[in-house]
Image (cartoon, rainbow, N blue to C red):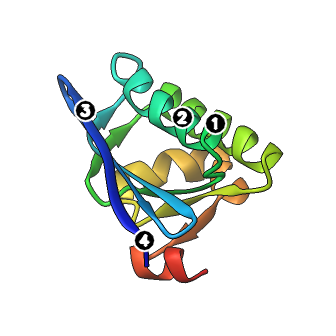
Amino acid sequence: MDRQTVGSTQRGRLRVDVRNEGSSAVVTPAGELDHHTADLLREPLEEAVSQGRARLVVDCSQLEFCDSTGLNVLLGARLKAEAAGGGVHLVAMRPVVARVFQITGAEAVFTVHDSLESALAD
């Protein structure tokens, strides 16, 4: 399996790591995703799609908080990925993050996995 670290960036309360694994871009946000940090996640998701990696796996295991702006970033990435023939797979959401998706009904439009392994195998 192709494992390549693409990049990492950090601004305040959010760090985002990106690596390519097979045909997927694995994006791992760690910390708080809100209106102050949303672009830090939006940019690598959009870049992955523009580089032909339309299958985005977002490992949420280290994501401690997500507000509506963060949710909108993921919804926007989903639309772009699907337009390119892919999709967004969310992995290992903590209860506080999952709650935002449940309240808004957004969990219905994403494929959610318990583990990174299952997301990559799907």
Q: x, y percentage for residue 112?
A: 56, 67
Task: Kindly give the residue lying farthest to the top in the view shown.
Answer: 36
Label 3 secondary element: strand
Determine crowd level at label 1: few under 14, some 14-19, many 20+ residues with C-alpha closer than 10 A: few
- What's under tag 3, amino acid-wise? Thr
Taking the spot 40% from the left edge, 49% from the top edge, the residue there is: 97
Q: Position of residue 64 (x, y in %)?
A: 27, 46
Do the CB atoms of the residues marked 1 and 2 lie less than 8 Å apart? yes
Please state which of residues 97 and 19 is positioned toward the viewer in this rendering: 19
The quadrant of the picture occupied by the C terminus is: bottom right
Q: Nearer the viewer, mark 2 or mark 4?
A: 4
- Rate crowding at label 2 as few (under 14), some (14 to 19) or many (20 or more) other CA atoms within 10 Å: few
Between discs 1 and 3, the one toward the N terminus: 3
Residue where numbered disc 1 is placed:
50
Q: Is residue 2 visible?
A: yes
Q: Which label is found at residue 9?
A: 3
**SS category of the residue bearing label 4:** loop
In the figure, is residue 83 to the left or right of 72?
Answer: right
Report the amino acid beneath label 2.
Answer: Glu
Task: Name the residue beneath numbered marker 2.
Answer: 47
Q: Give the residue type that dot 1 points to.
A: Ser
Q: Kindly indicate the quadrant of the structure image that contains residue 20.
A: bottom left
Please report whichever mark, 2 or 4, sits nearer to the chain's N-terminal start: 4
Which residue: 41% across, 73% down?
A: 116
Q: Work out whether mark 4 precedes mark 1 in sequence or the reverse, and give the earlier one.
A: 4
Q: Which disc, if any, is residue 2?
A: 4
- Pinpoint residue 48: horizontal percent, then vertical percent: 54, 43
Report the residue at 63% width, 42% height from top: 49
